Every structure is written in C-alpha cells, then in structure tokens.
Image: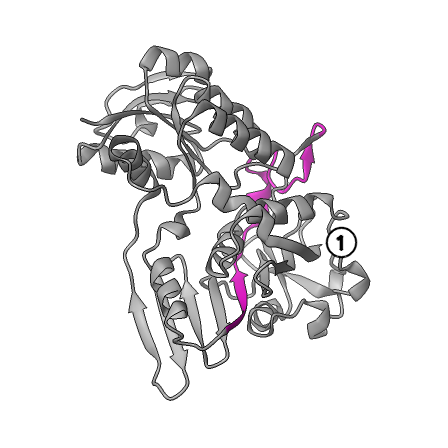
Amino acid sequence: MSADIVLAGARGHGRWHLDNIRRLQDKGIVRLAGLCELTPLGRDEIPEGLGTPEQSADLGALLDSTGARIAVICTPIPTHTDLALTAAARGVHLLLEKPPAPSYAEFRRMADGIEAAGVACQIGFQSLGSHAVPAIREMIAEGAIGQVVGIGAAGAWARAEAYYRRTPWAGRRRLNGVDVLDGVLTNPLAHAVATALALNGSPRAEDVTDVELELLRANDIESDDTSCIRVSTAPGRQVTVAATLCAEKPGEPYVLVHGTRGRITFWYKQDRVLLQRADHGPEEYEYGRTDLLENLVDHVTDGTELLVTPASTGAFMKVVEAIRRAPDPAPLPAGAWHPVPGEGRRAVAGIDALVAAAADTLALYSELGAAWARPKEVSR
C-alpha cells in the first residue's frame, strides 16, 4: 500500500522533490495527496502523472483534509521548525530539508517536539544516503589508510548575483529580526560539513568541542559566500571545511579522510570514492544511493532504520550555531575579487587552490597566507 504525501514548498528546490515523488509514485510507493504553497501551483507546474493533488497555503488544514502520513518540508529555513511541529502534532512523519533550523535553539525545539510526538523525521542530507558512506567507514575500520588523523572538505562552487535575489531570505543572516543563516556552509555546501562530520564519527551535538571560523563575502550580501571552519571533536580529530560560491572554475565538492598511511577522497554528489594508500596503486569505486524519502517510507511501513535522524545532525547544527553567533562576515577587499564576464557573478582570485589546500592541510585560509583572511578574523 502506498503512503500519502503532502509536499510543503513545491517551487525552487521543491521541484526536485516533485520529480522524486513522481518517481516513487510510479513505483507504487507513495501518492502525492497535497501541495502546500502560498500561491497554488498551475497545472503546468505539476509533473504529468501526479494527478490533481489538493492545494492549500495552510499545512495543518491540508494534512487534516488529506490524511497524509508523510510531509516533505522544503520551505524557507526560518519556517522549518513551526511547520515540522505542525505535522508532528498530527502524527505525520517528516522529511525535513537541510539545514533543519537556523539556530540550535530552534533545532532543539523541533527535535524535542518531534520526539515527544513519536513521529519519524528524516533530515534531507542526501549525501548521507550514499552507499559510499558505510563503505568508507568499513575501509577506515579495516585500517586501509592507517589511523585517521583528520578530515578535510572542499567545495568550490559558483553562484550568479541573481542567486541572491531569488527570494527575500537569500544570502541573509536575519530577516525581520528572525534568524535565516543562508550562508555557503549552512545551505549550498552544508552537505560538505555534515558529510565530513559523519565520516569523522562525530555527527552528534555532544561530539563538537570547538569551532573556529573565518566567514567572508565577495558579494554584496549579509551572509558568507567564501568561508572556512575547523571543528574540534570529541574523538580528538579536527574537521576542516573550506567553501566558496565564488570559484574561478567550479568543481565537484569532496570530503578527504586523512590517514597515517593514505587517504580517501569522496566526491559526495557523484557517490565516487578514491582510495590512495601506501604500497598500493590508486583504487576508485562508484556506489549507489538510497533515496531518503524512500528510506523514510520503508521506516514507516516496515521499521527500516532511518539514515539521517535529527540527532545525527546535531554536530552540524552546532556549526550553524557557531556561525550564527559569530560576527557578521567580513567583506573581501575590492581587489580580492573580479567580475566574471558574461556570467553575472564574482570570482575570488586564487580561491580554488586555497579551498583545496585547506582540505589538504586542515588549515584555515589565514594560516595558508590569504592576505584578506587575517588571523584576527578567526572567531569561535
């Protein structure tokens, strides 16, 4: 029997969820019962084959009228907690897009409320559904690269200036007095942070002991677009993540596991792994991926273990909280970036190599000699 689903937030990234729901509906796993949007979707916005789902701007009323068992929430970040609790109060299970909340307090309110309601909640870090994650953990456990000494992650992406005009909350730290935290590490490249923490074996809030940050921006926005963090963790290892939305030549983001006898590189969007170790030639692997909505449906129907629970994203939320509490990102000097002709975006000179070097050495930008990242701008 298929599970009835309501999707809240069907435009923007929500279009990906619509297509995925269509895929799962074709398999007989789910049925799209309702769409929650402030402005109803037109017929041409709903993928063919999904029928005519009920539409409403009121999620609670829509869940009541459809009797849906699962809600997918893909709405602006500040709305996540209230909408999640609206669903939980009705006994509706959840797939909640990342980042789960804009502050640790809101995250705890959401997670505690969901636990009290007794419903399941999957957080939408799709990279953690990759079969490469348990495979890498097995490589580490078998000692393939010796003892793990640290984790690096690198993301060099590009976003046009129009990206920051797509919604009122884009590129904002706050909006109308409410936390948003739409920065490079908390939203577009949040997967790099969460995946690095997971592979380090430190996914929970209590695993984070310290966070150092360098938050900067080339664009005329509130939030950060070129940043790095170094997280100290209970296992005694450090996790360094460097990211930018101002790459000169954008590339695939990756996580790098450093060992005493080798390293493992994981291109998490491609489910691709490179194992390099002493006395061996390089070994490359490609893996499959479990869809997080499908995993949630399996959990609800037959008790399959959830892949990404709120508790397993607590460490990521500690990073979000450190970014929230940090001083506003420092603007890069005009000479540090340049407009990219014909692309309507800004690129930071030398940032691609700097991001890669940070992941490779576990050092911050300032420690790598970036003139625009002065040590005094490191905050905790």
- Percent x, y of residue 78: 59, 31
Instruction: Give 29 or 366, whichever is nearer the viewer.
Output: 29
Q: Outermost residue, right direction?
A: 376
- Percent x, y of residue 24: 24, 36
Instruction: Give 126 or 201, whichever is nearer the viewer.
Output: 201
Residue range (magenta)? 148-177
Image quarter in which the C terminus is found:
bottom right
| Location of mark 1 (residue) | 330
Residue at (45, 79) in percent of width and height: 262
Q: Can residue 184 be seen in this snapshot?
A: no
Residue at (30, 31) in percent of width and height: 300
Image quarter in which the N terminus is found:
top left
Using residue 2 as the reference point, say whether residue 285 is left or right of it: right
Tally the numbered discs.
1
The kind of residue tagged 1 is Ala
Mark 1, secondary structure of its residue: strand
